[in-house]
Image (spheres, rainbow, N blue to C red):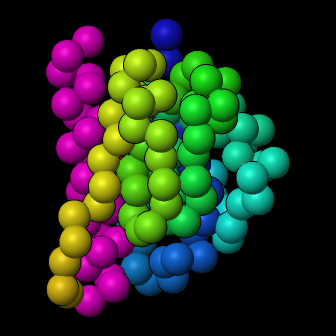
Amino acid sequence: MSSKERVVFLDRAAFTADELPIPGFEHNWSEYPDSETADIVPRLFWATTAITHACALDAEAIGQLHKLVRIVVTGPAVVDADACAARGIVVQPLPEHETARAAAGRKLIDLLEALVDAARQTR
């Protein structure tokens, strides 16, 4: 089994290139400026980590994402918490802060790295 994470950011336009550093763990990264509802399952099908700012993830979509381990929510996106709990998917909102947007990007990557590290320690 590969330990490489597959991270998909569904609506990356919420962050500029300068605001989001590259994660330090081994990964494949895919990003989209935004995603329509019909695009969500195909884009996340092989993902272990989904990042969403405003794209909703409902129970129907979550039920089709068999590799998904975690979802990081960076904004107002609605994620079906019950469907995630039933599948053992961790849903983690990016903590609110009052600092610059660049700090939000760094916080996002720090959070991702912590979640991936914690998951690897429990394997």
- On the question of residue 26 being in view, the answer is no
Magenta residues: mostly which secondary structure?
Answer: helix
Residue 81 picture location, percent across and down: 40, 37
Q: Position of 112 compared to 7: left or right?
A: left
Above or below 60: residue 27: below
What's the residue at 44%, 67% (across, down)?
76
Quadrant showing the C terminus = top left
Q: Farthest residue toward the bottom?
A: 100
Residue 55 occupies which quadrant of the picture? bottom right
Above or below 96: residue 70: above
- On the question of residue 80 being in view, the answer is yes
Residue 7 picture location, percent across and down: 52, 44
Q: Position of 98 compared to 94: left or right?
A: left
Q: Position of 68 compared to 73: left or right?
A: right
What's the residue at 49%, 77% (across, down)?
15
What's the residue at 55%, 22% (across, down)?
67
Residue 10 occupies which quadrant of the picture? bottom right
Range covered by the magenta-colored residues: 100-123
